[in-house]
Amino acid sequence: MRFEYVFVVIFVSGVLNSKVSGEPSGYLKYVLDILGDVVQNETNGIGIKCRRHLDYYQTGLETNRFWALQMFDATSKLPSGIGTGNTADLGSFEECIEVNQRIDSSNSLRGRYCFGETSMNLKEINATITLKLASCLPDSCSTADASTIYKYFGLNISFPENLCQTFADRDKLRFGISEYCGVVFFGIFALVIAASTTYDIYLYTTESQVKHQALVAFSILKNGKKLIAIENNAKQITCMNGIRVISTMWIILDHRYSVQFYFPLWNNFYKETWTRSAGNMFMINAQMAVDTFFLLSGILVTYVYLWSAEKSTSFHIFKFYLHRFLRLTPVLVAVIVFIVTLLRQFASGPLWSSMIHSQLIEGCEKYWWKTLLYIQNYDRTPSMVRNFSVFNCYNNEFSASLTVGI
């Protein structure tokens, strides 16, 4: 496969540079010729305003205007390192969207960043390569216009609308009803925490007794002490604490390494070598760390039941389920509310829409109720909402099956 990609590099380089040889600025001249053909052909379906701005962009490149060179520089070229598996070029996101050139008193040209992909069938070596490339064109050009322009370069690139952004899209806070609901929700929560903590500090300084435990339930002081407290309880199984810590660190380490495989890599082919190394088996099989928590949960449920039987006290299944639901669900509700209402406002970037918005936010907006009922693992719809909550789903179902015979 690596040997084939060497030919891919040579082939694609020949396609893109077939009109370039012999001139130091040949590629730029090639682009200018293509832009000229696009602008002059009035039957190619490109919008009037987009055509006008492309003409202005072409003039800017011919006269070496800085803003035009910025757009040209921000646009992807042939990615380096295709022979090692790098088939994506993100271009320069910030450089593109920061272009804002005034044409006249009522018209401005702004850069619009789009990220798309194209498949190239190389019959000479019987291989197909998928290139992911970035485009920086005037914001007056639609995704269809961008695809039409790239056909003049011999590339059939599709640009999804959700992978296109402008400076206004990045900096504009699109506050709607859901965003205001999120602010109100977390604002009330913050006020409750502040009031509860203040009351707890007052009781501590005045050495007063707590009359109602509910008033200090959200106190940072009280809950912080519980988090760092070490109890010597005879009912504890102390070895399970060590298993829990080791498994937690194992999962964190796995997430630290595995997240890189969701993004374009320069040395994509190295993954095959990496997975064959015996020293990396600890990372490759880190998913098994989650199973230890299933084991711990099963042991604890069994332990509580046996302890109740030994004390001749009844094991209330309904109370067990209710306690478990009330303990897990409020935090999950807060996470879902944050994702659906406020997460989209916290960042931007070339992969923000595809990695966060399209898969995580939209999934939570549609299937939040399945998450709260802990049944989303039976949903075949791809949604990243399951990635952070699927453990709770499995754990609750295993606990339910464990108590069926009780």
Image (spheres, rainbow, N blue to C red):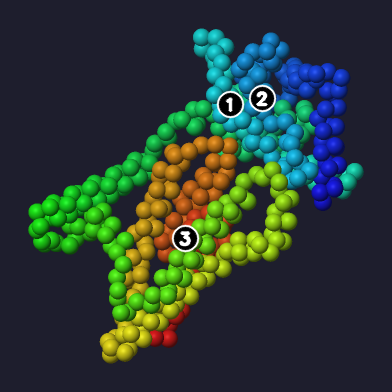
Q: Crowding near pointer 1: few (<14 within 10 Å), some, many (20+)? A: some
Q: What residue is disc 2 on? A: 73
- Mark 1 lies on a secondary structure that is helix
Query: As shown in the figure, which amino acid type bears the numbered disc 3?
Result: Ser
User: Where is residue 107 drawn, in percent x and y?
Assistant: 54, 14
- Mark 3 lies on a secondary structure that is helix
Between 146 and 168, the residue placed more toward the observer is: 168
The alpha-carbon separation of the residues under discs 2 and 3 comes to 42 Å
In the image, residue 95 sits, relative to residue 311, either above or below, namely above
Q: What residue is disc 1 on? A: 95
Q: Residue at x 32, y 88 (%)?
A: 309
Q: What residue is disc 3 on? A: 389
Do we see residue 356 in this rendering? yes
The alpha-carbon separation of the residues under discs 2 and 1 comes to 8 Å
Q: Are marks 2 and 1 in contact (CB under 8 Å)?
A: yes
Q: Earlier in the sequence, mark 2 or mark 3?
A: 2
Q: Earlier in the sequence, mark 3 or mark 1?
A: 1
Q: Residue at x 43, y 74 (%)?
A: 240
The alpha-carbon separation of the residues under discs 3 and 1 comes to 37 Å
